[in-house]
């Protein structure tokens, strides 16, 4: 039983729900501020930490949705298993790995434990009763927390730059989710919600470019990027309202946000 589970279930789940072509860019995106100012921590430890965090919470998302996914996506690995208990053990093993990486960094470890506790309460008591719009907004909170924890291992400043980074990261995921998940089109007043999120993302990207002006990047680079952010946000929203396939727009949002973080944290790139 254990052998077949090890040989089939975990690799199959990884290939299905954690493909490198999607999640490696996500991990790099979250790691940008930390990798460019790694300080005393090794870049490998930062990447391993983010890999553990992203995988742990991805698995947790799937475990939390397994009952509804059995109806909508019966072909998925978790949905085809009569018991998902072994995956909770996998979740625990990854969590222990994260704790090991954070050992010796007490404030970061406390932040991680508080985050895990909050998400446990969310999945156990609140998520089943929350509307779809609230669910994906709440779940996306984990990503700026990951950025904060990873930055704690580096020499990254805790000032406005980190706050702007966390805001842009959160809004990028919040905008991307409905652009690639057509099920969210059915949510009430989704056009209004996405319109507000896109507007906030545009403002956040603009603030990022303003903070990057001067030492981090030249104005000749930032001005076209700011205009590109506005144009992309407008085109994404118009496409969503037409109920077209917005996946590529979502990828564009991610790419432009990635460039924005490089301009904000990569001062040495423009020297």
Image (cartoon, rainbow, N blue to C red):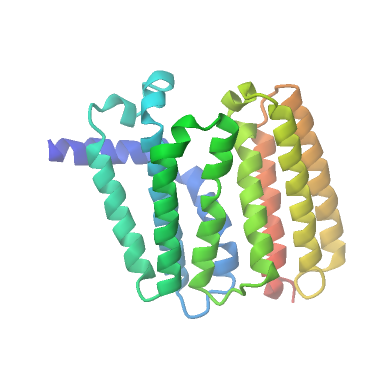
Left or right: residue 4 versus residue 13 is: left
Residue drawn at x 27%, y 43% as measured from the top left: 88
State the image coordinates of residue 247 (x, y, percent, origin top left): 64, 33
Judge by depth and name the residue closer to the eye, 103 or 181. 103
Q: Is residue 44 in view?
A: no
In the picture, the quarter occupied by the N terminus is: top left
Image quarter of residue 17: top left
Q: How many marks?
A: 0
Q: Is residue 183 in view?
A: yes
Residue drawn at x 45%, y 63% as measured from the top left: 111
State the image coordinates of residue 241 (x, y, percent, origin top left): 75, 25
In the picture, the quarter occupied by the C terminus is: bottom right
Image quarter of residue 173: top right
Q: Report the residue that reaches farthest toward the bottom.
A: 40
Left or right: residue 237 versus residue 4 is: right
Q: Report the residue that reaches farthest toward the top.
A: 71
Q: Is residue 19 above or below residue 46?
A: above
Residue drawn at x 55%, y 68% as measured from the top left: 34
Residue drawn at x 66%, y 35% as measured from the top left: 248
Left or right: residue 10 versus residue 218 is: left
State the image coordinates of residue 187 (x, y, percent, origin top left): 62, 25
Left or right: residue 51 versus residue 175 is: left
């Amino acid at each position: 039983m254990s052998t077949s589970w090890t040989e089939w279930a975990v690799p199959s789940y990884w290939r299905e729900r954690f493909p490198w072509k999607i999640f490696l860019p996500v991990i790099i995106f979250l790691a940008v501020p930390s990798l460019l100012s790694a300080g005393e921590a090794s870049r490998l430890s930062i990447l391993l930490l983010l890999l553990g965090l992203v995988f742990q919470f991805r698995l947790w998302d799937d475990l939390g949705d397994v009952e509804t996914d059995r109806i909508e996506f019966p072909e998925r690995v978790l949905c085809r298993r009569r018991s998902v208990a072994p995956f909770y053990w996998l979740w625990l093993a990854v969590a222990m790995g994260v704790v090991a990486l954070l050992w010796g960094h007490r404030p970061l470890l406390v932040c991680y434990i508080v985050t895990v506790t909050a998400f446990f309460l969310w999945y156990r008591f609140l998520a089943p009763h929350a509307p779809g719009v609230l669910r994906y907004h709440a779940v996306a909170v984990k990503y700026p927390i990951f950025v904060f924890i990873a930055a704690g291992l580096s020499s990254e400043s805790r000032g406005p730059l980190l706050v702007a980074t966390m805001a842009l990261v959160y809004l990028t995921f919040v905008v991307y989710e409905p652009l690639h998940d057509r099920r969210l089109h059915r949510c009430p007043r989704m056009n209004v919600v996405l319109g507000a999120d896109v507007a906030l993302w545009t403002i956040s990207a603009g603030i990022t470019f303003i903070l990057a002006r001067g030492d981090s990047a030249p104005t000749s680079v930032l001005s076209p990027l700011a205009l590109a952010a506005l144009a992309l946000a407008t085109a994404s929203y118009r496409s969503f309202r037409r109920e077209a396939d917005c996946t590529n727009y979502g990828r564009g949002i991610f790419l432009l946000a990635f460039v924005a973080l490089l301009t904000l944290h990569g001062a040495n790139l423009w020297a």
